[in-house]
Image (cartoon, rainbow, N blue to C red):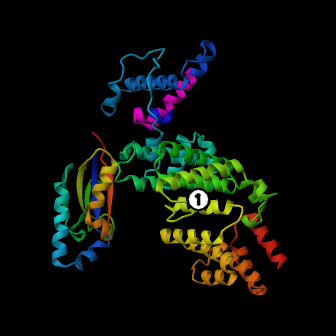
Amino acid sequence: MLAALVGYLGDFDLAEEAAQEAFAVAAERWPREGEPANPAAWLIVTARNRAIDRIRRERTLAARARLLEAPEAFEEEPEVDEQFPDERLELIFTCAHPALGLDAQVALILRSLGGLSTGEIARAFLVSEATMAQRLVRAKRKIHGAGIPFRIPPPHMLPDRLAAVLAVVYLIFNEGYDSQPQLAEEAIRLGASLAEMMPDEAEVHGLLALMLLTESRRAARLVDGELVLLADQDRALWNADRIGAGLAALGRARALRGAPSPGAGPSGGPYAIQAEIAALHAAPVRDWGLIAERYEELAALTGSPVVALNRAVALAERDGPQAGLDAIAAIDLDGYQYLHAARAEMLRRLGRTEEARSAFLRALELARSEPERRFLQRRIGEL
Amino acid sequence: MQYLVQIFTGESMGAWERLSEDEKTSITQEYFAISEAPGVTGGAQLQPPETATTVRVQDGRTLTTDGPFAETKEALGGYYLFEAEDLDAAIELAARIPAARLGGAVEVRPLVAR
């Protein structure tokens, strides 16, 4: 509803205020007169009429020329047989515009598409409600003042802009992954609507698949507040519906690339490749050879040392711990706890206990979350 | 909307000095081409910041200081005025400006509509 109003009115604040007024009118009238046949359309038309009314009052004529061509009188009972275009996609591209800061993009998307309140977003990102409100106000002012367009970007801009949208959604997902399931759920919902609205974009399905497959393991990942490694997780705790939906989304991503068979490369963009890896982990028997191959593709695509570390872990599973250690030696990521933890595991398996201990201790120094710290202490105790 | 497209040469002056005559000519051509682009309604290259004089008025007295208001390396090198549908169009124009890829930067700001 908000998307339709922003699209029509071209103004965030106006759309939000009008929507609130329409809800207030509905709350007052529907219990008395019964719900209209098409409640959503009724709300949009009512909100739009309220906004037109307000603009007339305020006489900001020049900036609102488009609105003044709209129907003449404010109707008490709006005609609701109109079709309203779904403009959520335009809205998400506006909210994830690269001229806005990443913090602002996240807040705007959660507020306008996720429907979270300012207070909820503030709590999720550990800032005060006033700070978050200020951030939203500033972002909306920039959209309006700088002329950030409300539209789906033209083809020559689409790849970059779509990547920006996907990055924000994935950021929201990761923000929620550890401790805030509601953000992760919100990100999955956003991913699913994107997939519905842009059915031909393989990476959109890739991201949705990645989020669903990752989220499917939530219940198994933390047991009684303790972190459980993927290899040790109780598969019975994995959410089979989520895995099914994730694999289906991955199937659509593959089909769009024209990939001949599951797991056959090239595996597409970064999200699709990560989803392929998540799917390989969900298989009854893990094929570490394929997992290492996918990480190799991902490393070539992103140049990320974190990806190179994951590849080293897969190599250790496929070719033994020494192969993993050799691969890790080439990675420059000394401040990254998972590098030291992975190295420690490999050293432990090679029987180099003292070296393993000091690597675990280094990881412990760098670990930030309590479950991770306790996990590392347990590993050290077991040496 | 109207945008002021400000060109900050930053480090790009050094890059400019190292270019061959042919390269300088072709970059100058690029600037001319941008000033001819649809929507560009004005623009100019400024003399170097050393030529700037900064003026303030205190108690009715005009005070002048030598040099630019901003630090020399942050001083404006030139600008275009650009009439465009939206920010995306202005960003695309800005990205064509040679200084943007030669170590400088371009700042796009909307003008207040009157």
Magenta-span inclusion, residue A10: yes
Residue at left 66%, top 68%?
A287
Mark 1 element type: helix
Residue at (65% x, 74% y) in the render: A313
Q: Position of residue A56 (x, y in %)?
A: 37, 23
Query: Which quadrant is home to the C terminus of chain A?
Result: bottom right
> Is A228 in the magenta?
no
> x and y percent of residue B75 in the render?
29, 65
Q: Nearer the viewer, residue A123 or A91?
A: A91
- The residue singled out by tag 1 in the image is A275
Which range is magenta? A6-25
Query: Does residue A180 appear in the picture of this structure?
Result: yes
For mark 1, name the chain.
A
Q: Is residue A125 visible?
A: no
- The three-letter code of the residue at mark 1 reads Ala
Residue placed farthest to the top in the image? A33
